[in-house]
Amino acid sequence: MTVEVRSLVDQVFHQLAHAILGGHHRAGSTLPPERALAEQFGVNRQVVREAIRRLAQLGLVEVQHGEGTHVLDFREHGGLDVLALLMEQPSGRKHALWLPILELRAALAPEVARPCPLRAKLPLRRELVRTCQAMKAAESDRELYALEGRFWDLVHEGANHIVYRLTYNTFKRTARSANELGMAFAVSELKRTKFRLPIAEAILAGDAERAEREVRSAMRAQLEPKRKRKPLANAKPLAKRKRAVGSELQ
């Protein structure tokens, strides 16, 4: 088992970030002064200052000299890097986020797969096929999950698209935060989609349209059942909706 040792700055940063994302410090409020936070966490003010600087980089707070540190609404000011922190929140929020994450992945992954057959050199395309074969022979879920990461690393390397690659890096951090949830989903998907081999074979053949189609099909196959199981927010039974509409017309 790997034990993660975080620096003092990391510890203060994560505690403050989770307090903000969890609603303890609400948008529009002001964080306690540096001195008070330093006493609260038992650290010096330089540690607190660095932690707050990192919060500001993520769009969670805004430092206004002379007026304190104001908490921002992460939905308006945050970026994709906030996802990994949200996935470290209590399990209810983690599961609620999983479907939107899968929807974004399903939208982006086919677009990444399409240029890979055209841009990647032959050795990389062959390595993709070997990686799929290794997935099929994997002896444990953890080994399979690691190979899945290797597969997409290669696809992004072959696609050579910096914006997609940076977005993918955020997805990787988010998946690590999801822990067992992310691994269980990935393993289930791999076993249902022939361990990505149809995608790898399309890339090896230099067939961009087929690679895109195979990725889209694999992603949708896993996504649709989850969409059907997730009720719409504020949804009402049809009979109740009809009565509500009727009362509004009267």
Image: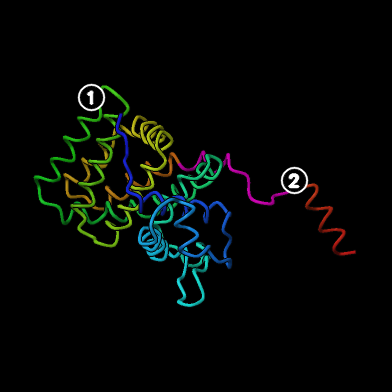
The crowding category of the residue bearing disc 1, from other C-alpha atoms within 10 Å (few below 14, some 14 to 19, many at least 20), is few
Q: Which of 218 and 42 is in front in this view?
A: 42
Name the residue carrying label 2. 237
Is 241 part of what is drawn in magenta?
A: no
- Inspect the image, locate mark 1, and give the three-letter code of the amino acid beneath it: Ala
Q: Which part of the image, by quadrant, shows the C terminus? A: bottom right
Looking at marks 1 and 2 on the same chain, the residue that comes earlier in the sequence is marked by 1
SS for dot 1:
loop
Indicate how the structure is coloured in the image. rainbow
Residue that numbered label 1 is attached to? 137
> At 58% from the left edge and 54% from the top edge, which residue is drawn?
24
Say which residue appears at 39% left-offset and 50% top-offset.
Answer: 105
Q: Which residue is drawn at 84% across and 53% down?
A: 243
State the residue in front, 76 or 34: 34
| x and y, in percent, of residue 99 in the image | 49, 46
| 227 left or right, relative to 148 | right
Q: Does the magenta stretch include residue 231?
A: yes
Asked if labels 2 and 1 touch by Cβ distance under 8 angstroms, the answer is: no
Drawn side of residue 104 relative to residue 172, left or right? right
Magenta region, residue range: 223-237
Whether 168 is drawn above or below 59: the answer is above
Q: Percent x, y for residue 106?
A: 40, 49
